[in-house]
Amino acid sequence: MLSIIYLAFMSLGLPDALLGSAWPIMRQDLGVPLSYMGIIYMIVCGGTIISSLLSDRILRRFSTGIVTAVSVGMTMLALFGFSVAGNFYLICLIAIPYGLGAGAVDAALNNYVALHYSSKHMSWLHASWGVGVTISPYIMSYSLGTKYGWEGGYFSAGVIQLVLTAFLFAVLPVWKKAATKRGEEEVKPKVLSVRQALKFKGFPLMLVSFFCYCALEQTAIIWATSYLNGSRGVDPKTAASFGSMFCIGITVGRILLGFIADRLGDRFMIRAGCAVTLLGILLVWLPVNSPLPALIGLIVIGFGNSPIYPCIIHLTPDSFGRENSQSLVGKQMAMAYFGNTLMPPLFGVLAQFTSLSLYPIYLAVFGVIMLVSFEAMVKKVDAAKSEAKTE
């Protein structure tokens, strides 16, 4: 069962780095400015936010297995659509189902693993996403070196998704067998509005912590190369390679930390991850002539980030109830994409009017708020549990 889930989550990461890898050539073929990539990205994120918020309603009607297979199928169709579109506005239209499919499978699988598996499996689930997002630039770069260009890269990724979609539909009976083996029916999620979700003690603070994590992670990834080159004087090739090391740090961290996650617990892992992240930010900020501390710091930030996202999600059923978790995880996913979408461009605006040297300070602000809001959330959740026991 877990191998199926890991493959499905790897398929979620597979398309994520294709657009950034292809865009320098893709935008020339489409005849649009460099900045238009942001339009496509925001359409995808918009679809993801919508499907994340609707995930509780969708999963109340359909099983996790069906939602996963259909969602991967939607991303597969979008990838094939990108490969033949040849027009920017048509690509924008095709980006809608891609975003809708990505959000649904993200929320569904995160909650399923949070409900039925231990923390280590949640860590390895997100490591499998890292494998997918690491593979996709190599697929695109290979295709760009052939006569098939970026269209061929999207087509190749689409073929992989097609195989995965067929596999996921073929193994739908396995989901039922897994539930029967555990002696339980799949948990039917409660449908909660945003207002109802915010009434859970501590959940608004969890959303703040989650938003700050995603803002920090995405800003660190997107602006690492520009900061190293523009502020620390690192040559572009070296800066680009160490910028990508951030993602490798996250993936390797999730694989390694999965072995100790159950022993240490979600709360400890989140606190330790925040501490290591802030240490990495300090190394990036150090005002020394050598760029080496900044290069090492980016890897340290990636490693520190690795347990935070999966452990926050894994905490959700225990903190707020299994029957509520799907709705709450869906809202967490929506908040994640808000952070991913809004905060990196905001840093670009700030850097334009100030300096790229603001990069580590910007990251530190989110890192501190993330840790403070998490600690406040823990206190409120524990207080609510104590009140429930005394009643």
Image (tube, rainbow, N blue to C red):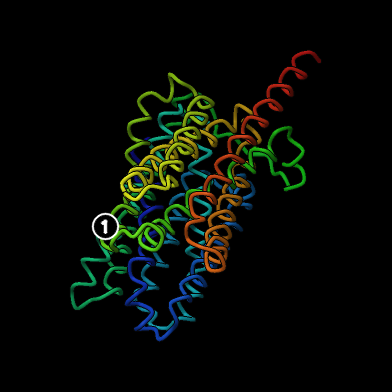
Q: Residue at x 63, y 29 (%)?
A: 375
Judging by the rendered image, the residue that carries numbered circle 1 is 238
Query: Relative to residue 110, is residue 339 depicted above or below?
Result: below
Which of the 4 image quarters holds residue 235? bottom left
The answer, for residue 207, to whether it is visible in the render is yes
Secondary element type, mark 1: helix
- Residue 126 position, x and y percent, is 41, 41
Taking the view exactly as shown, the residue that stands out farthest to the front is: 289
Q: Residue at x 35, y 56 (%)?
A: 14
- Residue 366 position, x and y percent, is 57, 46
Query: Relative to residue 96, is residue 249 depicted above or below?
Result: above
Count up the numbered dots. Answer: 1
Taking the view exactly as shown, the residue that stands out farthest to the top is: 390
Please give left or right for residue 237 compared with residue 382 in the image. left
- Residue 315 position, x and y percent, is 56, 30
Looking at the rendering, in which quadrant would you find the C terminus?
top right
Taking the view exactly as shown, the residue that stands out farthest to the right is: 391
Query: Relative to residue 106, is residue 341 depicted above or below?
Result: below
Q: Residue at x 39, y 83 (%)?
A: 30
Q: Nearest the camera: 32 or 168?
A: 32
Few, some or many residues within 10 Å of mark 1 (<14, 14–19, 20+): few
Please give left or right for residue 150 compared with residue 298 in the image. left
